[in-house]
């Protein structure tokens, strides 16, 4: 069941990357689409939720404080990711975002009694990080703005904290044996509601100051993204409960990177270098090693 959920989550996450790729073709305003995305994700959760809790019960939940922080990190993290891509470069930003698996893995090994670090896991983790570097490596040398190098470092920190907090909520407040699907839907809806409020401030102000034109296509794009975003986060949340951090995060991130590269070749005619293909082979090796373990 855990493997199946992880595969579904990986497919949804890659779908999000494809949606952003299509956004460029239709000249979608990312800020408008993102605000709508968080709203629709929260609304979708509320619509399918059939439990007894209401929105006014959110502050009283034990997981409220970490979910509040997570909702904030989601929105702010995306803004930093966009800035880092523009200022520091796509490759270095992507590598640092994936290298962030170190944070939840090390936290899990230290904090959760049920988790352990073995030679096989360390080897799999090393192969995973090596594959990230090789898959994202471009034959054209990318000029790195040294003044903006702090942005990829922030991406490393924010992405790592996002994964760590989500796993913490899963482990501490949602025991797989006793949690029900409504509780999981409720917390996802809560996180997206918080992200929606934060996104209004972060993305809404630039929209007003720059007097950007409000277009229906941005709302449609945001609505599609919102539903996929909810499904990706929900299936990821479900899947991570079946694995240790040192197994889940390397496999999950390698799966996203590998599938994204393959989809890019098939649908967008992207060309991979020999180095990129070696990275994909190493990624497959990392997945097999960690899965066998």
Image: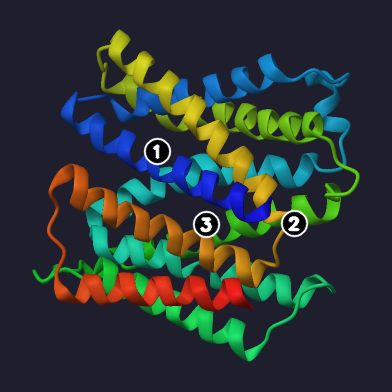
Scheme of colours in the image: rainbow
Give the percent coordinates (x, y) of residue 159: 51, 57
Residue 281 appears left or right of 3: left
Residue depicted at 44% across the width and 19% down the height: 223
Q: Is mark 2 on a helix, strand or loop?
A: helix
Judge depth for marks 3 and 1 and give the one in front: 1
Q: Distance between the residues labelled 3 and 2?
A: 15 Å
x, y percentage for residue 228? Answer: 48, 31
Compute the Cα span from label 1 to label 2: 24 Å
Up the image or down, 138 lies above or below 233; here it is below
Residue to which mark 1 is pinned = 16
Q: Is mark 1 on a helix, strand or loop?
A: helix
Q: Residues within 10 Å of mark 3 (few under 14, many from 20)?
A: many
Labels 3 and 1 touching (C-beta < 8 A): no
Which residue is denoted by mark 3 in the rendering?
158
Of the image marks 3 and 2, the number of the one nearer the N terminus: 3
Horizontal and vertical percent position of residue 37: 47, 25
Q: In which quarter of the image is residue 53?
A: top right
Considering only order in the chain, which callout, 1 or 3, is on the residue closer to the N terminus? 1
| Mark 3 vs mark 2: in front | 2
* Residue 46 seen in this snapshot: yes
Instruction: Identify which residue is drawn at 28% across, 68% down.
Output: 135
Residue on which the image places disc 2: 168
Q: Quadrant of the C terminus?
A: bottom right
127 left or right of 218 in image: right
Q: Are marks 3 and 2 in contact (CB under 8 Å)?
A: no
């Amino acid at each position: 069941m855990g493997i199946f959920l992880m595969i579904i989550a990986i497919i949804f996450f890659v779908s999000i990357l494809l949606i952003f790729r299509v956004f460029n073709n239709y000249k979608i305003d990312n800020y408008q689409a993102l605000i709508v995305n968080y709203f629709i994700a929260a609304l979708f959760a509320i619509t399918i939720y059939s439990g007894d809790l209401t929105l006014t019960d959110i502050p009283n939940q034990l997981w409220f404080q970490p979910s509040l922080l997570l909702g904030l990190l989601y929105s702010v993290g995306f803004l930093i990711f966009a800035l880092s891509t523009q200022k520091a470069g796509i490759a270095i930003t992507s590598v640092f975002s994936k290298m962030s698996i170190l944070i939840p893995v090390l936290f899990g090994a230290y904090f959760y009694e049920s988790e352990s670090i073995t030679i096989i896991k360390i080897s799999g983790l090393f192969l995973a990080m090596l594959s990230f570097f090789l898959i994202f490596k471009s034959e054209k040398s990318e000029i790195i703005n040294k003044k903006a190098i702090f942005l990829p470092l922030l991406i490393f920190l924010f992405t790592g904290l996002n994964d760590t907090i989500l796993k913490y909520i899963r482990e501490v407040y949602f025991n797989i044996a006793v949690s029900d699907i409504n509780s999981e839907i409720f917390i996802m809806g809560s996180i997206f509601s918080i992200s929606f409020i934060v996104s209004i401030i972060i993305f809404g102000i630039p929209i007003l100051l720059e007097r950007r034109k409000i277009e229906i296509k941005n709302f449609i794009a945001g609505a599609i993204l919102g539903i996929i975003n909810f499904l990706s986060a929900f299936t990821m949340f479900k899947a991570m409960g079946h694995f240790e951090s040192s197994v889940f995060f390397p496999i999950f991130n390698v799966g996203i990177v590998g599938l994204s590269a393959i989809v890019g070749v098939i649908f967008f005619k992207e060309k991979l270098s020999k180095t990129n293909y070696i990275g994909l082979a190493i990624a497959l090796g990392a997945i097999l090693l960690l899965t066998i373990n």
